């Protein structure tokens, strides 16, 4: 039987940008917007408090995504607390392609393990990452949210895998966040069931080049971030996003749709002031650094 620790447990989880152009459902990067959450096992009931991004639109009951992830992790460890208090301070924009749902899932499983005495023995990192990817349905955001840095992930023999790679320290990034979001299910619904073999081959080559570019040869980022599989296909749901991507790329800026969009992620290797000046009216601009640390318990 699990024993729950006294007092609250706190966690910080980074935003993530997945796909990065050609790395559809396989490449992801942790970036420097972080949600901070606190949870505590209590005598009875459920209390959910939320402030910041998305606070007006998320439930405060068992359907809250962090709570659902915590419940799944508690089941994995064999015990549910009698009551639960959860407090969320959100900085990651919702429905913008910056991994807010993955951050919630990762935060939930890490908080749950932290609340159980000896949780590391009951739920390994590998088990929690598997659980988080199962809950999300794909690993490209949950893996960097959990591990930090640049991660190549996927599925092999009915198991998820995630491999970290280094990021060249010269690389910087800017996120251009539009005022309205697009639900991932809508963006995924626009993708065709089949793609031409030539497009798949071209994408494979650019994804391989992107790993080389991010890990040590950023001069290849513009060519490496070209995509054939998903960005143009999603234009009906986010025309302003694709227009910005094309303007930036025409000027030599390696720009991509972040995740399922509609945020635009632009890479640089120098001062980002010139990139920030390209932010459309009404959009938010965030200077980002690559976060080497993933989900971390706070002391």
Image (spheres, grey):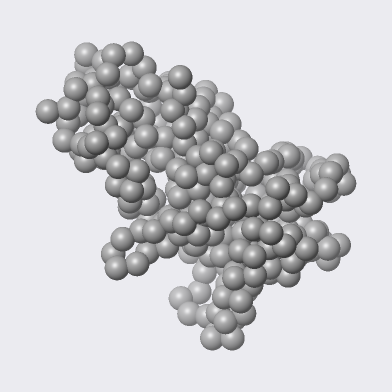
> In the picture shown, does residue 141 fall above or below 216?
above
Write the residue at 60% across / 41% down. Answer: 291
Q: For residue 88, say whether it is visible.
A: no
The number of numbered badges drawn on the structure is 0
Q: Quadrant of residue 175?
A: top right
Give x and y (percent) for residue 33. Answer: 61, 36
Give x and y (percent) for residue 299. Answer: 45, 19
Residue 195 vs residue 78, the one in the foreground:
78
Give x and y (percent) for residue 95. Answer: 54, 45
Residue 164 vs residue 255, the one in the foreground:
164
Q: Can you name the residue that lies furthest to the left here?
A: 1
Write the residue at 54% across / 86% down. Answer: 197
Give x and y (percent) for residue 78. Answer: 16, 35
Residue 111 vs residue 48, the one in the foreground:
111
Write the residue at 64% across / 70% down. Answer: 209
Does residue 93 appear left or right of residue 299 in this picture?
right
> In the picture shown, does residue 103 fall above or below 228?
above
Write the residue at 59% across / 86% down. Answer: 198
> In the picture shown, does residue 239 fall above or below 128?
below
Quadrant, the N terminus: top left
Q: Quadrant of residue 256?
A: bottom right
Q: For residue 73, say whether it is visible.
A: yes
> In the picture shown, does residue 26 fall above or below 146?
below
């Amino acid at each position: 039987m699990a024993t729950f620790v006294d007092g609250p447990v706190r966690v910080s989880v980074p935003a993530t940008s997945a796909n990065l152009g050609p790395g559809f459902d396989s490449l992801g990067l942790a970036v420097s917007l972080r949600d901070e959450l606190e949870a505590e096992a209590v005598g009875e009931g459920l209390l959910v408090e939320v402030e910041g991004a998305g606070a007006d639109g998320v439930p405060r009951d068992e359907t809250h995504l962090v709570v659902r992830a915590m419940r799944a992790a508690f089941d994995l460890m064999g015990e549910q607390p009698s009551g639960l208090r959860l407090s969320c301070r959100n900085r990651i924009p919702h429905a913008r392609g910056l991994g807010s749902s993955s951050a919630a899932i990762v935060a939930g499983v890490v908080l749950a393990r932290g609340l159980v005495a000896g949780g590391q023995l009951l739920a390994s990192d590998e088990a929690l990452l598997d659980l988080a990817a199962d809950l999300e349905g794909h690993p490209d955001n949950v893996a960097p949210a959990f591990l930090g840095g640049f991660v190549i992930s996927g599925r092999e023999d009915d198991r998820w895998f995630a491999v970290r790679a280094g990021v060249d320290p010269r690389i910087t990034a800017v996120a251009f966040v539009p005022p309205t979001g697009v639900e991932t299910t809508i963006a995924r619904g626009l993708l065709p069931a089949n793609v031409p073999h030539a497009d798949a081959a071209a994408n494979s080559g650019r994804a391989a080049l992107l790993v080389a570019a991010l890990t040590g040869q950023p001069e290849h980022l513009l060519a490496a971030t070209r995509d054939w599989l998903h960005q143009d296909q999603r234009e009906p749901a986010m025309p302003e996003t694709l227009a910005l991507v094309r303007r930036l790329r025409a000027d030599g800026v390696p720009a991509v749709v972040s995740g399922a969009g509609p945020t635009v992620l632009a890479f640089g290797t120098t001062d980002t002031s010139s990139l920030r000046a390209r932010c459309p009216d009404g959009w938010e601009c965030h200077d980002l650094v690559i976060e080497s640390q993933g989900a971390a318990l706070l002391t």
